[in-house]
Image (spheres, rainbow, N blue to C red):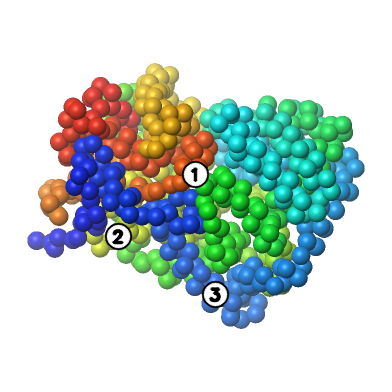
Amino acid sequence: MTDVLPSGLAVSEFSSDIRPQDDLYRHVNGAWLEAAEIPADKARWGSFHMLAEQAEKDVREIIVESQDAAEGTLERKVGDLFRSFMDTERIAEIGLAPLEAELAKVDAIDSIPSFLHTVGTLDRDGIAALIGVFIEPDPGNPERYVPFAVQAGLSLPDESYYRLENFEGTRAAYRAHLERILTLAAVADAAGEADRAFGLEHEIAGHHWDNVASRDAVKTYNLKTWDEFQQLVGVDLSPWRDAVAAGAVSSVPEPVEGQGPNPFDELVVYQPSFFEGLGALLVEERLDDWKAWLRAKVVHGMAAYLTDDFIDENFSFYGTELTGTPSIRERWKRGVSLVEGSLGDAVGRIYVDRHFPAESKAAMDELVANLIEAYRQSIQKLEWMSPETREKALAKLDTFRPKIGHPDVWRDYDGVDIDPTDLVGNARRATVFEHDRQVSKVGKPIDRDEWFMPPQMVNAYYNPLMNEIVFPAAILQYPFFDPKRDAAANYGGIGAVIGHEIGHGFDDQGSRYDGDGRLQDWWTDADRAAFEERTKALIAQYDALVPAGLSEENHVNGALTIGENIGDLGGLGIALKAYELSLGDEEAPVIDGYTGIQRLLLSWAQVWQQKSRDAETIRLLTIDPHSPNEFRCNQILSNIDAFYEAFDVSEGDRLHLPAEQRVTIW
């Protein structure tokens, strides 16, 4: 007989006065929710943030040690970048000089073409953007990279902050903040400039698509030639293009077939009507408004690298006003964030050596294999799906590529020059290096070894264009994962996360891509209709949910969160099946008085442990495609038959949903 491993659950913290049948989230986390205090420098606090805090401390150790590394080494670059951020005496000595140099560029703008060239240069420098740009595989032909042009230009979280009545106070606070920070920057007529900048932003916001429309994979795929894009906007954007691509045009000496020599010869236009509206604003009569808008963008973009008066003013709005967070993070924490954003893989290599044991990789390989097999068996048994679509769904599942822990190929930072006395220059050079690296992908083969998160990040993702699921090392820890505890808790933790990420391949948007990452309809009309009937029911469930302590208008947006809710629903449902597969013919042990399925579900509740400030909850309800954690836990459970069986849930219990109202998709 094998030894019984510990449950890996904080059983002593469970609340005996809250029944699991009424609220499993608070049954598991209630005592913690009452006792825990959100740290003063956080907008929310929970299992993800505790792991991130530990990873931050681990990374700080690596960075501090790197300050003493040999000259010319990658480690020394890491240490010198951090040193430049922590050298507040040098920052005070330089004062406004770096900002004045950038504002002088804005002052020199004398036409819309020169404005476009300047904003393109500032975009490449990481300071300001009017048109968002990123490089990804072409959804219509995922064997090649193309640029994507997306709406941008706002300084509030999204377009609804400029539109909705309940954000009127936020708008007033933002306008006042603009005037204060422009005054700090010694901008002439700060009040008038703030009015012009805010007024133009309000107009820009009027052309933005909302968050629901912007996540539609079909509506946002609009492949255009550069000339077609120009016609759409109605303005010559070549000054912007030439500045944005300044470091990359020469990187396509031998273009792939059908690809011109300029990275922007073809591009995907995400929100076409935004660009039409933008073109109508890019007229000489509005040049002073655009210069005011750009001055505000420049000051915001550089504030983090200036003296404390800029940092504190920026935080008073973006931290305290928008998220309710009373205190800014300590300077060393902000320095760690700069290093991770600029040289993440350089730190990640050392982090993995110290904090990612080989046994974790082996255990994760087994978990992923069981989750994929459970999905396969579930898809094979789906009653609502035709054999034709089922065959293609299984083919997509077979091509899923898991990446676990860390990349096999680390990023090369030889092209980044770091000077321990030049913080602003370091930030610019690191940003330009990464920007040019991205734009230079166009015309090159797809890099399937690339990761879009460093291993020290507590997160995971699914990439539909490469059909890959990625799990950085830092999330592979308690409470999500522990190779030394009983398997049930791991299946309820990281197992459900794995299932969630696989589920994104089959959610309302991921299901529009095939196994090669190509955007194409592989469903029959009847199957898509059956799928959407289920998703509509789930949308309606979530639309009715309001976080505890908030008023009725602050309800979940079921349409915005549907993709993540499908991921959660499939993730837990398939994790349950995978756990049963892992048992084989053996019976799960009873540990701490709980059956295997009960422990899995209790672990699921444990990983969603989180407290959030009200302002942050409201902000996330507006812009975040994830539902609040209490609903990611409880609302999913209400749709899972195994929960009813495990905890004897019956009519009258708060989490009970009549069987005919429960949604099962995968």
Q: Where is residue 194 drawn, in percent x and y?
A: 75, 42
- Work out how far the residue at label 3 is from the one at label 1, CA to CA, in angstroms: 32 Å
* Dot placed on the residue nearer the N-terminal end, 1 or 2: 2
Q: Is residue 489 left or right of residue 397?
A: left
Q: Is residue 23 visible?
A: yes
Question: Residue 310, relative to residue 65: is it above or below?
Answer: above
Can you tell which mark lies on residue 616? Answer: 1
The crowding category of the residue bearing disc 3, from other C-alpha atoms within 10 Å (few below 14, some 14 to 19, many at least 20), is: some
**Residue 242 location (% of width, % of height):** 80, 46
Q: Earlier in the sequence, mark 3 or mark 1?
A: 3
Residue assigned mark 2 = 482
**Secondary-structure class at tag 3:** helix
Looking at the rendered image, the disc whose residue lies closer to the viewer, 3 or 2, is: 3
Q: Quadrant of the N terminus?
A: bottom left
Which numbered marker is on residue 64? Answer: 3
Camera-near label (3 vs 1) is 1
- Kindly tell me whether residue 223 is visible in this rendering: no
